[in-house]
């Protein structure tokens, strides 16, 4: 199709910040809003998503020569669903309390658009190594985005970070931040901030080019 | 034959479905026992705290409900009854500890709740739920604002009366439903 | 497009297109409207200071200074001139402060101001662009954020104010204990409650001034009061033994304060006469519904915010018919 297919290194780096799944592509917002009221839950979600994303990408890339265009989405979904179920069972077996806390959001990784978009964009078209690098970069980007939101929410809402007390004892917990409205407010303000930084940087770049 | 052609073009889907099915069956075989143990352990590990003196327990079916017999050296010391109901924000799930004939509450544990953080979720803290220990089930418990004066009163949670009343209501209802059956089950034990 | 003349050639009045508050009369500025609101709030402010002493003064100072400070800060961030001259920040701060309990810690007013100005107003593009009443956005945020400091219990904290401050608020007493209240204190305002809501007469006095000055549209408070009176009357007929009459419903809680000073915000309320009726009746009905069925004793904040959200839709459904009939569809 196109003359230039991005290399593995490019794919990896693109996924972290320049094409961050949350801040740039606005994909996978359901888990982003639902499980970011604490760092532990957010990082467990990031880990489970990374496992599913990397496994599904590698497998899709391996069978990419066999894919029929009209059946590809079915194959992606089947692959993703299988790995999600494995991740879900492992959490229930080895991290039972966390599995209970995350509840339906682990099975809901199946409908996380980030994974199916990586299957569609990269791993069904490029080799195994590139697909794995791409999945790794996007997973890292997703984890960073979740961490940024969860950090704000947990510190303001509970005065802790990873369950450790970071704010002084007199800190009045902003309860709303660990409730669903806090997720929308935090994501909205952080997105605004990210766009503001990007706009400022582009303006500076444009100015330096003009000079 | 278009049906045959469809089937042929879908062979990959079928093969993957079989493969994943087998893989998931394997994972299930590997982990199912552990997961079931986790679920059971969540309740069983609370039994010594809910029924003082008990060192273990086992699930029993009484009147179509799963309850847990709290035992010490094979004798029934009391019962742990899982229950639940509507709270202020969402469902509240409880474990209620009762003595052998169901006449006294021996403990209360909140398995799951989503009450308002900082207000209603004080129901999970020991100072509040500990009040239920030793209460007689002879008459229904009532929530009282301020310090309780008589035996069947429970101190409310400041600013979250509804949460406190929900828990009391669930306890009262469960006791009313189960007390007689539990007492009977204790009496019918062979070694008594 | 070819049939339309160039703007220079078109005769007739010049139509200004600008965001709200929409001001038709010459000499009427945003600043004067806001000044009117401040004047109208004077009676309830005076009652609150009489009742809660320096607690009230402190809350009002935090609210007004906080909102002004954040307004200035955000204007600076956006490279705009100082907007403090139009007094809208002062009004937001005063209404926010008057909607808080006397016992609220200092940070409640400050966080409320930040959210009221920042999320209630500035993120939408500033005064006139906001969908929701800024003071109510701030109030709702702190209500969810600090439930312990703003719940029913916060009003009953023992303090060194007047003796009033240790009683339950009339609505809480009615809801949780089934107690009614004598009517006279509700009217004068010698009861517990949020700073500005206690005195029904004070709200009426300021409200009537606002309506006479036409700073507030009279249809909105009248719609709210009518709906609340009707539903309160039905409730009263259904349970006459409760002792909580229509007048209690009107005079107790924040209904009048909300009806006159909060719901009438010209930016976030409908522009058309029919729309104002729908909006007012909607708020009144919602308040009564929330008082009867929600977990909270009062529902003015939620009712105003909900109907604020519906305002664009109400305006759209109630476009008045122009003189001489509707404009024929263009071929």
Image (cartoon, rainbow, N blue to C red):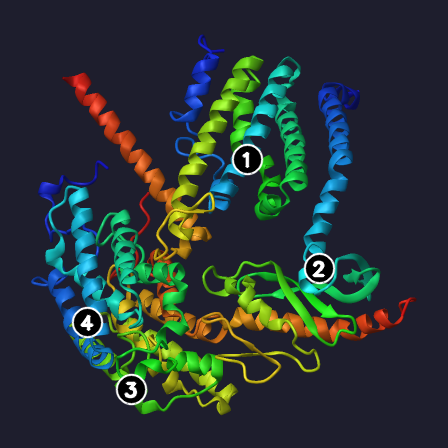
Q: CA distance from mark 2 to mark 4?
A: 54 Å
Which chain's residue wears label 2?
Answer: B
Crowd around label 2: few <14 · some 14–19 · many ≥20 (10 Å): many
Estimate the x, y position of residue C136 in percent, counting from the top left: 31, 62
Crowd around label 1: few <14 · some 14–19 · many ≥20 (10 Å): some
Estimate the x, y position of residue A203 in percent, counting from the top left: 22, 26
Q: CA distance from mark 3 to mark 4?
A: 22 Å
Residue ID for mark 1: A112
Which chain's residue wears label 1?
Answer: A
Number of numbered discs on residues: 4
Q: What residue sits 37% from the left and 67% below the top?
A: C150
Q: Label 3's element?
A: helix
Q: CA distance from mark 1 to mark 2?
A: 40 Å
Residue C180 visible at all: yes
Q: In this picture, is C209 found above or below C74?
A: below
Q: What residue sits 40% from the left and 66% below the top?
A: C148
Q: Earlier in the sequence, mark 3 or mark 4?
A: 4
Q: Label 1's element?
A: loop
Residue ID for mark 4: C57
Q: Quadrant of residue C324?
A: bottom left
Q: What residue sits 34% from the left and 70% below the top?
A: C280
Residue ID for mark 2: B47
Q: CA distance from mark 2 to mark 3?
A: 57 Å
Residue ID for mark 3: C187
Which chain's residue wears label 4?
Answer: C
Circle nearer the viewer, 1 or 2? 2
The answer to whether dots 1 and 4 both sit on one chain is: no
Estimate the x, y position of residue C313 in percent, counting from the top left: 37, 57
The answer to whether dots 2 and 3 both sit on one chain is: no
């Amino acid at each position: 199709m196109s003359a230039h297919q991005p290399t593995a290194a490019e794919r990896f780096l693109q996924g972290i910040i320049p094409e961050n799944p949350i801040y740039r592509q606005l994909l996978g917002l359901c888990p982003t809003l639902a499980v970011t009221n604490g760092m532990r839950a957010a990082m467990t979600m990031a880990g489970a998503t990374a496992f599913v994303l990397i496994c599904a990408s590698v497998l899709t890339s391996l069978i990419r020569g066999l894919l029929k265009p009209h059946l590809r989405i079915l194959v992606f979904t089947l692959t993703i669903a299988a790995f999600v179920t494995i991740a879900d069972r492992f959490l229930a077996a080895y991290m039972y309390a966390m599995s209970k806390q995350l509840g339906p959001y682990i099975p809901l990784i199946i409908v996380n658009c980030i994974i199916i978009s990586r299957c569609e964009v990269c791993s069904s078209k490029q080799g195994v190594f590139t697909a794995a690098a791409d999945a790794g970069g996007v997973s890292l980007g997703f984890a960073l985005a979740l961490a940024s939101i969860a950090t704000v929410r947990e510190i303001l809402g509970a005065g802790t970070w990873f369950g450790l007390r970071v704010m002084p004892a007199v800190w009045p917990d902003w309860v709303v931040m660990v409730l669903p409205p806090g997720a929308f407010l935090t994501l909205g303000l952080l997105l605004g901030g990210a766009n503001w930084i990007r706009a400022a940087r582009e303006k500076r770049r444009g100015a330096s080019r003009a000079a | 034959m278009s049906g045959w052609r469809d089937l042929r073009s879908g062979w990959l889907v079928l093969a993957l479905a079989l493969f994943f099915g087998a893989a998931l069956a394997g994972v299930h075989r590997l982990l199912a026992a552990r997961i079931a143990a986790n679920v059971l352990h969540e309740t069983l590990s609370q039994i010594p705290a809910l029924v003082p003196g008990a060192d273990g327990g086992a699930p029993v079916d009484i009147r179509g409900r799963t309850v847990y017999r709290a035992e010490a050296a094979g004798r029934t010391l009391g019962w742990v009854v899982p229950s639940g109901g509507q709270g202020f924000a969402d469902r509240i799930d409880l474990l209620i500890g009762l003595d052998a004939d169901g006449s006294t509450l021996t403990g209360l544990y909140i398995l799951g709740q989503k009450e308002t953080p900082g207000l209603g979720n004080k129901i999970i803290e020991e100072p509040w739920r500990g009040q239920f220990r030793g209460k007689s089930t002879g008459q229904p418990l009532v929530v009282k604002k301020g310090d309780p004066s008589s035996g069947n009163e429970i101190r409310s949670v400041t600013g979250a009366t509804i949460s406190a009343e929900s828990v009391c209501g669930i306890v009262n209802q469960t006791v009313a439903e189960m007390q007689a059956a539990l007492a009977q089950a204790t009496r019918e034990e062979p070694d008594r | 497009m070819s049939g339309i003349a160039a703007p220079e050639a078109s005769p007739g009045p010049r139509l200004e297109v600008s965001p709200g508050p929409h001001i038709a009369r010459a000499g009427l500025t945003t600043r004067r409207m806001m000044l009117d609101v401040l004047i109208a709030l004077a009676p309830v402010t005076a009652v609150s200071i009489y009742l809660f002493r320096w607690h009230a003064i402190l809350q009002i100072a935090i609210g007004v200074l906080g909102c002004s400070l954040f307004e200035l800060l955000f204007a600076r961030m956006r490279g705009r001139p100082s907007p403090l001259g139009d007094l809208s920040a002062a009004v937001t701060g005063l209404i926010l402060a008057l909607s808080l309990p006397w016992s609220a810690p200092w940070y409640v007013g400050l966080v409320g101001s930040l959210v009221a100005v920042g999320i209630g107003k500035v993120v939408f593009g500033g005064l006139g662009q906001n969908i929701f009443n800024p003071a109510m956005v701030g109030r709702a945020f702190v209500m969810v954020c600090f439930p312990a400091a703003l719940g029913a219990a916060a009003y009953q904290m023992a303090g060194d104010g007047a003796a009033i401050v240790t009683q339950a608020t009339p609505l809480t007493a009615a809801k949780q204990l089934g107690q009614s209240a004598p009517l006279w204190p509700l009217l004068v305002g010698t009861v517990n409650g949020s700073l500005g809501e206690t005195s029904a007469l004070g709200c009426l006095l300021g409200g009537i001034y606002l309506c006479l000055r036409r700073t507030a549209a009279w249809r909105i408070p009248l719609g709210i009061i009518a709906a609340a009176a009707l539903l309160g009357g039905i409730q009263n007929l259904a349970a006459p033994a409760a002792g909580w009459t229509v007048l209690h419903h009107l005079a107790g809680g924040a209904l009048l304060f909300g009806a006159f000073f909060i719901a009438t915000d010209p930016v976030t309320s409908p522009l058309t006469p029919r729309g104002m009726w729908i909006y007012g009746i909607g708020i009144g009905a919602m308040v009564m519904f929330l008082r009867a069925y929600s977990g909270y004793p009062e529902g003015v904040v939620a009712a105003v915010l909900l109907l604020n959200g519906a305002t664009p839709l109400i305006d759209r459904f109630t476009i008045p018919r122009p003189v001489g009939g509707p404009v024929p569809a263009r071929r």
